Amino acid sequence: MTWNNPLAKTLKWSGEISNQAQKERVAQQVSSFVEDGDVIGVGSGSTAFLALQAIAKRVTEESLKIQAIPTSKEAALNCAALNVPVTTLTAARPRWGFDGADEVDEQSRLIKGRGGALFAEKLVIASSAKTYILVDKSKFVKKLGSVFAVPIEVDPRAIHLVETKLSDYFDPQSITLRMAVSKDGPVITEAGNLLLDVRFSEIISTMEKEISAIPGVIESGLFFDYPIEILSV
């Protein structure tokens, strides 16, 4: 049996989608990559949301057998609404995936995590042979970190330790605990952790590993040297 209530059939996206016509063209391009039997990592962002819809259309029209590994509860809900079967990293490995980004520099290094799903996103991207990063021109920067802070997911027990170590090691411009908008208190990630948004004066190639080595850090929003291909709107 399937759920027939309205929420079960409703796609979830908050707010308007900018540059929708251009993003839909990229979404169609991504949908053309789908092959029968694929396991696909499904990320976040408005273009990824449109790509999932285009993929679901092909699945229905062509009776394709695929499985999706969503990187957030939002993506999982949308897969369910579109009748796209889901699986997990413990059961299958994605052949490829698609996701968004907050910033992309000239070396195709990324900042991700403004949506709070950075840990799952990094797990899926690291597990995939290739991930298509879907961005519009506003996401390209000459200097990484010039627009957005770097999100860092932290075990709640280590919040003060991590802040202290970040200050000692990197002398950041600012460290803020991300606060929720529609609930009291800080944002809680899907893994039950907290998010620090950190602005650095400079981001260098070793920082992803150095930040991850701090006890209590679950993951950072720095994505360096992963098998990605940038698809720009």
Image (spheres, rainbow, N blue to C red):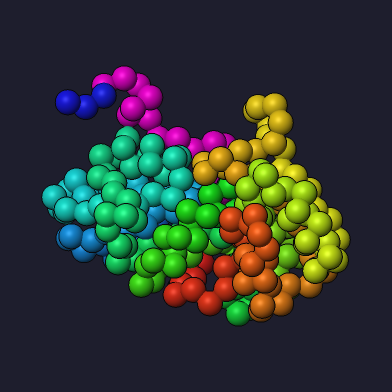
Q: Is residue 123 left or right of residue 82?
A: right
Q: Is residue 134 above or below residue 63?
A: below
Q: Pick the residue in front: 14 or 228.
A: 228
Furthest residue in direction left, as rendered? 63
Chief SS of the magenta region: loop
- Asked if residue 15 is among those painted magenta in the image, a careful observer would answer yes
Q: Pick the residue in front: 218 or 71.
A: 218
Image-quadrant location for residue 186: top right
Q: Position of residue 143 (x, y in %)?
A: 73, 73
Q: Residue at x 75, y 53 (%)?
A: 161
- Asked if residue 140 is among those painted magenta in the image, a careful observer would answer no
Q: Residue at x 56, y 40 (%)?
A: 192
Q: Position of residue 149 (x, y in %)?
A: 73, 57
Furthest residue in direction top, as rendered? 5
Image-quadrant location for residue 30: bottom left
Segment tinted magenta in the rendering:
4-21
- Quarter of the image containing the N terminus? top left
Q: Position of residue 182 (x, y in %)?
A: 65, 28
Q: Is residue 84 above or below residue 65?
A: above
Q: Is residue 118 visible?
A: yes
Q: Is residue 51 visible?
A: no
Q: Position of residue 72 (x, y in %)?
A: 46, 45
Q: Residue at x 44, y 64 (%)?
A: 125
Q: Residue at x 71, y 77 (%)?
A: 204
Image-quadrant location for residue 111: bottom right
Q: Is residue 96 left or right of residue 151?
A: left
Q: Pick the residue in front: 178 or 14.
A: 178
